[in-house]
Amino acid sequence: MKGIISRLMSVEEELKKDHAEMQAAVDSKQKIIDAQEKRIASLDAANARLMSALTQLKERYSMQARNGISPTNPTKLQITENGEFRNSSSC
């Protein structure tokens, strides 16, 4: 009987160890997933800003084409380090 109890306790300890290792692996993968979700959100925001800038450019040049105006001093679109857009006229 003592042998059976000893074996059960040994198996229980192995299972606890395996569970802890698997939980550590899951936690590590969850951190990766969280970082990827954050990166995706950042890319979505940058994509939205790019699409907005593209729409503005299309509207501007479409309006100029309808009016027969050639842009003599076109606006340059600059992207800052944090992904923001800034318009600046070329001199």
Image: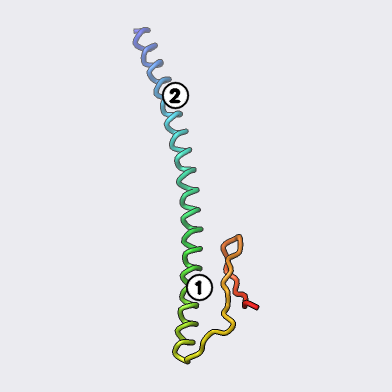
Residue at (47%, 33%) from the top-left corner? 24
Q: Quadrant of the N terminus?
A: top left
Contact, CB < 8 Å: mark 1 with mark 2? Answer: no
* Badge 1: residue crowd in 10 Å (few <14, some 14–19, many ≥20): some
Answer with mark 1 or mark 2, whichever residue precedes in sequence. 2
Q: For the view shown, which residue lies furthest in the right direction?
A: 91
Foreground pick, 16 / 32: 32
Q: Which residue is mark 1?
A: 53
In-front residue for pair 13/47: 47
Q: What is the residue that sits farthest to the bottom in this orientation?
A: 67
Q: Nearer the viewer, residue 79 or 21?
A: 79
Q: Is residue 71 above or below residue 8?
A: below
| Residue 63 spot, x, y in % from top left | 47, 87
Type of amino acid at the residue the image marks with label 2: Lys
Q: Which mark is residue 17?
A: 2
Position of 9 relative to 32 (above/below): above
Q: Secondary structure at mark 2?
A: helix
- Residue at the image position 49 percent from the left and 87 percent from the top: 64
- How far across and how far down the image is residue 54, in percent? 47, 73
Under tag 1, what secondary structure? Answer: helix
Residue closer to the observer: 35 or 91: 91
**On the rendered image, what quadrant is the C terminus found in?**
bottom right
